[in-house]
Every structure is written in structure tokens, then in C-alpha cells.
């Protein structure tokens, strides 16, 4: 199993928390501090993301000093934070601001962090802590007292990414730069994108992202190319029959974009140990055709603060007559309703999909294999294109407010729909899996 994308670890923050954080810090012309609590996520002993779940403002009585160019909090507060972290295992994110455009950590910041890192290492060994700087222009995050910088993602209907350094923009993207600007093209080049399912919709998504200049991919699919796939899998030919879909997609991506780094997993995302590899991506596309896989990825999106764009196409027929041709695409992020809120998932289908092979054979309600669904490449390509455009709306700020769309091919209409989050949803509410990271189990098969 190949999985590592070699991407930068990331600190992920719900948009609502980030907006409250900025209001708390930029109340006057002096520096201020705040604290966030988070859960670090490691896979194969590599840090993939740190998921923020709580924000704590620091009241004035907790400062020893606060001025326009410096700030210091009381040692008693630091001791209390260390005690909580030692008790819970939570990561601490120490935040301060520069109320002016000095967009880097100062020498004073470096010295203070060195001392704090020594203190926390002694009292909370093995726990990842973070230092975060917010200025009027940018956000910079790094592991406390270390030179390891983190990509910072503020996750919501509009998701922003911040990181240290820039990549060059190739001349082949000139026409896109005229729309996105160089900064937008930099974002595309730095994103790590996951695609789950490399069939009819997933192969088209991969093709379009490669043309856009995305350089890092994680592809997940257990299946091989069959003869009946050739009508709809982008880039496939008869010579590819028997080839893993992920290998075909990898070849196709690198033919379009030789700079791309593509990691692949030939396995089912219905296994939660496979799904967890998506925590090493910045945004993922769910292009599967089962309710079980959607249920896993739906919860992972909110549990790990991973923006996911889910899509699907349905062509229903009766006695050889087409009755309905419909498709949908939907962004899954905090602040927007999930697939449970939208009644998209069939609980019985989810149950069946997530059974082990032994359980499926033993289940008296599962009699026949699933009937293959009709599929047409033009319909898959339509919803894939709408989904990739939604990525551009969400991440690059390209004009476009829709975060859930339905397509009716018979009427020829695309409609913007709204899926409000339910306050008590077991997936996307604060009482559910939202921001829980590894502290909650993911649904799915074990193994």
C-alpha cells in the first residue's frame, strides 16, 4: 500500500472559530494572545493534521505585559494549560498577533518559544503543540519551538490556505492566471487532493485537476479496469483491461502534468484504516457509487475538518425506458449540512456496504449481487465539471456561491439547493463527530 503524498502537515480550524479568533485579537493596537485546543492526527507515525476543536480567549488579567510590539502571559496560565494537556492528551495552539504588517515570527517570539517548548516537552511528552501568528496580511503556524512550519487551513464554505514559501507558476497556466491570479495558481499547485473512486466521475475529476495544475494527489480505488468501464473511464483503452484503475489514473495525470506526485491505494475506503489516509489531503472528492463509502467519507469530512466534494449520477430505467436522469454535487464542510442532514444516505444500504465478506454471506437479506447501474460519460463529465468548478469557488474565491447543486438532464436545468445543518446531527453538529478527529471511531469495516 502506497499512501504518503510527502505533503506538509496542516493545522485545520473551523471558519467560525477563526472569525472569533480575529475579533478577539484585533480589538486594539496592542498585541494579544489566545489559546486553541486541538487533536493531532498521525498515520504511520507521520503527523498529517492537527484539528482545532476549542477556542479560549485570554482575559486582560492573565497578561504580565501587553504592548504594541510585545506580549507576555502569566506563568500560572501556562502551567494550567500544561496540566490540561497532560490530562487529556490534547494539543495546545498558542496564538498571538502582530497588529501591524510584520509577517514573520520575531527574534523575541523565537526565544520565548524555545523556553515554552522545553517546558511543555517536560510536562507533556509526545504531544504536538503549535505556535500560530496572525497579522493583518497572513497566518503562519509552526510546531512549537521548531522550524517545522505547518500549512494552515481555515475550513468552511470558503476555505483559505496559508503556508510559508511560494512555488513558481509555469507559463502553461497563463490563461488561468488571468482569472485566478498568481496567488490562486500557487494554491492549486500546493494543494494535496484526494480522489476516492477512479471510475466514471473520478477519472474526469483527475483529468481536470491535472490540467488545472494540481501537483499532489492521493487516489483510492480497489477495482481493475473491465471492458464495461471503457465507455466512461477517461483515458482508458482496451490495452488497459485488467489494470488497476488507480494506476491508469496515475498514468493519465502524469501524462498531462509531469510535475505531479501521485500516491495510490488499491483498496476500499469502506475500511476505516484506508479512509484515514485522506487526513493527509487538503480537500477530497468522493466519486464512489455506494452508500457505505459515502457514509465513511461524510463523517470523515466533519470529524477531521477535511473539505469533501461528494457527487453522484442516477439514471433510472423501467422496462427499457428512461424515467429519470439526475446528478448532484455537494460540499461537506462545517457550517453546511452533511449527507445525513440531506437524507442522501440509505441506512440499510450503508449497513450492507459496510458488512465484512463473511457477514454479507451470512446475511439473509442479501440475496443477489448489485445490478450494474447505467452510465454515460457525458453525464458523468457534466457533474464532474460542476464539482471541480465548486472547488475553484470554495478555495480560490472564483465567483460562485453554490455549495450544493442538482442537475436534471431531462429538463436541462442546474439548480442551487441549500442543505442546512441540523443542530443534533450525529455527524456534522458539535454534539456529533465534528472536530472529534481520532477521539471518535469512524464507521466502516475494520482492517
Image (cartoon, rainbow, N blue to C red):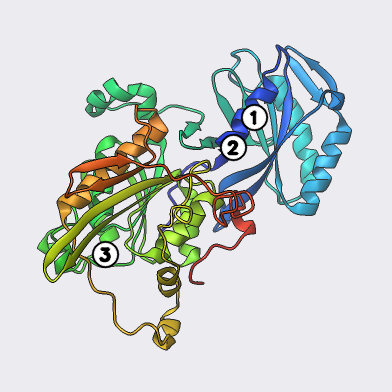
Of pointers 3 and 1, the one earlier in the residue sequence: 1
Instruction: Provide the residue designation for mark 3.
Output: 244
Label 1 Cα crowd, 10 Å radius (few <14 / some 14-19 / many 20+): few
> What's the distance in space between the residues labelled 2 and 3, CA to CA?
36 Å
- The residue shown at (35%, 34%) is 392
- Within-10-Å neighbours for mark 2: few <14, some 14–19, many 20+: few
Provide residue 19's location: percent of width, then percent of height.
60, 29
Q: Which residue is mark 1?
A: 20
In three-dimensional space, the C-alpha distance between marks 3 and 1, rounded to whole angstroms, equals 46 Å
Is residue 416 or residue 115 the one in the foreground? 416
Mark sitting earlier along the chain (2/1)? 1
Q: Dot 3, crowdedness within 10 Å: few (<14), some or many (≥20)?
A: some
- Look at the numbered disc 3 and give the secondary structure of its residue: loop
Among the 4 quarters of the image, the one containing residue 169: top left
Given residues 377 and 210, the one toward you in this image is 377
Q: Nearer the viewer, mark 2 or mark 1?
A: 1
Residue at (22, 42) in percent of width and height? 413
- Does residue 359 sit above or below 424 in this rendering? below
Tag 2's secondary structure?
A: loop
The mark that comes first in sequence, 2 or 3, is: 2
Amino acid at each position: 500500500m502506497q499512501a504518503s503524498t510527502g505533503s506538509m502537515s496542516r493545522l485545520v480550524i473551523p471558519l467560525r472559530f477563526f472569525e472569533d479568533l480575529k475579533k478577539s485579537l484585533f480589538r486594539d493596537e496592542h498585541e494579544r494572545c489566545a489559546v486553541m485546543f486541538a487533536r493531532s492526527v498521525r498515520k504511520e507515525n507521520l503527523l498529517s493534521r492537527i484539528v482545532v476543536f476549542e477556542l479560549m480567549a485570554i482575559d486582560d488579567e492573565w497578561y504580565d505585559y501587553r504592548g504594541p510590539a510585545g506580549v507576555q502571559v502569566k506563568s500560572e496560565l501556562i502551567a494550567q494549560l500544561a496540566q490540561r494537556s497532560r490530562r487529556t492528551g490534547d494539543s495546545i495552539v498558542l496564538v498571538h498577533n502582530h497588529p501591524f504588517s510584520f509577517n514573520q515570527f520575531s527574534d523575541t517570539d523565537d526565544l520565548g518559544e524555545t523556553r515554552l517548548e522545553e517546558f511543555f516537552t517536560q510536562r507533556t511528552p509526545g504531544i504536538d503543540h503549535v505556535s500560530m501568528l496572525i497579522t493583518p496580511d497572513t497566518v503562519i503556524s509552526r510546531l512549537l519551538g521548531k522550524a517545522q512550519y505547518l500549512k494552515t487551513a481555515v475550513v468552511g464554505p470558503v476555505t483559505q490556505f496559508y503556508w510559508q514559501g511560494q512555488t513558481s507558476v509555469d507559463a502553461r497556466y497563463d490563461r488561468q492566471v488571468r482569472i485566478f491570479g498568481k496567488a490562486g495558481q500557487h494554491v492549486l499547485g500546493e494543494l494535496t487532493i484526494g480522489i476516492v473512486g477512479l471510475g466514471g466521475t473520478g477519472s474526469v475529476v483527475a483529468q481536470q485537476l491535472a490540467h488545472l495544475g494540481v501537483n499532489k494527489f492521493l487516489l483510492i480505488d480497489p477495482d481493475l479496469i473491465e471492458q464495461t468501464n471503457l465507455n466512461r473511464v477517461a483515458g482508458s483503452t482496451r490495452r488497459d483491461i485488467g489494470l488497476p484503475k488507480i494506476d491508469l489514473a496515475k498514468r493519465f495525470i502524469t501524462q498531462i502534468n509531469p510535475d505531479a506526485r501521485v500516491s495510490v491505494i488499491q483498496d476500499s475506503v469502506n475500511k476505516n484504516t484506508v479512509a484515514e489516509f485522506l487526513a493527509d489531503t487538503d480537500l477530497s472528492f468522493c466519486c464512489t457509487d455506494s452508500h457505505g463509502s459515502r457514509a465513511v467519507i461524510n463523517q470523515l469530512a466533519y470529524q477531521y475538518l477535511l473539505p469533501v466534494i461528494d457527487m453522484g449520477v442516477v439514471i433510472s430505467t423501467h422496462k427499457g425506458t428512461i424515467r429519470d436522469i439526475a446528478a448532484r454535487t455537494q460540499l461537506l464542510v462545517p457550517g453546511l449540512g452533511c449527507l445525513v442532514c440531506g437524507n442522501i444516505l440509505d441506512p440499510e444500504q450503508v449497513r450492507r456496504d459496510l458488512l465484512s465478506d463473511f457477514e454479507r454471506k451470512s446475511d439473509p437479506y442479501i440475496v443477489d449481487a448489485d445490478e450494474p447501474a447505467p452510465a454515460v460519460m457525458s453525464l458523468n463529465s457534466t457533474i464532474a465539471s460542476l464539482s471541480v468548478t465548486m472547488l475553484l469557488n470554495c478555495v480560490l474565491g472564483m465567483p460562485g456561491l453554490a455549495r450544493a447543486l442538482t442537475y436534471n438532464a431531462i429538463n436541462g436545468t442546474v439548480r442551487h439547493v441549500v442543505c442546512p445543518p441540523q443542530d443534533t446531527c450525529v455527524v456534522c453538529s458539535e454534539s456529533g463527530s465534528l472536530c472529534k478527529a481520532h477521539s471518535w471511531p469512524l464507521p466502516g469495516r475494520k482492517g
